Amino acid sequence: MKTKHWYDFLWLWSILFFGLGFFNILFAWLGMIDFFLPLVFALVGGNKFFCNNLCGRGQLFSLLGGRLKCSRGKSAPRWLVSRWFRYGFLVFFLAMFANMLFQTWLVAAGAASLREAIKLFWTFRVPWGWTYTAGTVPDWVAQFSFGFYSLMLTSLLIGLIVMLLYRPRTWCAFCPMGTMTQGICRLRRRGGKEAWPGQTPWVPFAFVEKKFPARAIIPTYRAY
Amino acid sequence: MNRSKRYARPDGGRCVACGACVKECPRGAVRVDRGCEALVDPELCVGCGRCARVCPADCISLVAREVAE
């Protein structure tokens, strides 16, 4: 029987995030935690501790598709998990993110007005419109919230669709954050800037090393 | 000594290091190596195939122990 940790319940965070944003769009800013934390772990700790343990979305998919059996459990088509699709999807998502930042900048500069719309797949407006009272915060703050929440909701829907069609965590195979952090980890390993073995990890991440002692990996594994 | 006939072998090139297999393994035989790829300890692995069934990238296969040894 495996021990449960506090972070095994972070699927609740995912539900909470979308729930709060449903009532007030400004809570979308909280999603930046999910954006920066994986990068911090990858850049500083040289690992995917976030994906492996803290990703609320991944846990939610595991729960829905695994324990609650809302997944066909079939293998995803090879193209969906191929490297070119992963990197292509990352580029596409980063482009959409950059576009969202540009729209925010336009609003901040007064060149465009605030568009109070949550859009799915960058096209369809959601059928609810009570999430923001005009004038509560500067327009650019609200514009960013609408853009970021749209991005998060769209990616959640894509994740849920592939969860239903294929395996619970199929989204992880092309998740832009996962691709980015794995790329960083690979670069670190190639560049020799490893937190381990041989190097003491940065102190705040010592608990990760203690919990998952990577240096205990037996080199003979690689013989296969 | 591990008497199972098969053990799991991840394909490091295709692994997305999501950690789904780590959570699923009943023996704690799988770990993600520095955010790059999953590694399986053949001595701990009992060849149940649970990791292979949850792998989103479908990169884990079960191989016969005799072949590698």
Image (cartoon, coloured by chain):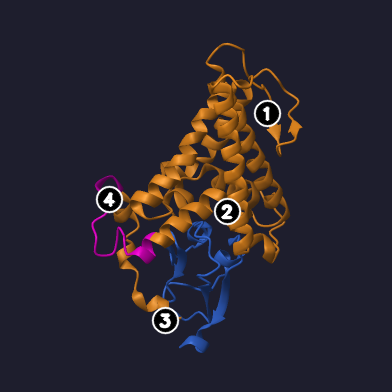
Chain colours: A orange, B blue
In the rendered structure, the answer to whether residue A78 lies left or right of residue A17 reads: right
Q: Identify residue for label 1.
A: A118
Q: Circles 1 and 3: CB distance less than 8 Å?
A: no
**Circle nearer the N terminus (2, 3):** 2
Density class for disc 3 (Cα within 10 Å; few <14, some 14-19, many ≥20) is few
Tell me the residue at 51%/88% (across/down).
B66
Q: Is residue A111 above or below residue B38?
A: above
Q: CA distance from mark 1 to mark 3?
A: 51 Å
What type is the residue that disc 4 sits on?
A: Ala
Residue at disc 3, secondary structure: helix
Which label belongs to residue A223? 3
Q: CA distance from mark 4 to mark 1?
A: 40 Å
Q: Is residue A190 magenta?
A: yes
Q: Identify residue for label 4.
A: A206
**Circle nearer the N terminus (3, 4):** 4
Respond whether the residues carrying marks 1 and 3 are from the same subunit. Answer: yes
Q: Would residue A204 be visible to someone looking at this image?
A: yes
What type is the residue that disc 2 sits on?
A: Cys
What type is the residue that disc 1 sits on?
A: Ile
Density class for disc 4 (Cα within 10 Å; few <14, some 14-19, many ≥20) is some
Residue at disc 2, secondary structure: helix
> Which region shows up in magenta?
A188-205
Query: Which residue is at the front of the view, A50 or A114?
Result: A114
Density class for disc 1 (Cα within 10 Å; few <14, some 14-19, many ≥20) is many
Q: Is residue B37 magenta?
A: no
Chain at numbered mark 4: A
**Circle nearer the N terminus (2, 4):** 2
Respond whether the residues carrying marks 4 and 1 are from the same subunit. Answer: yes
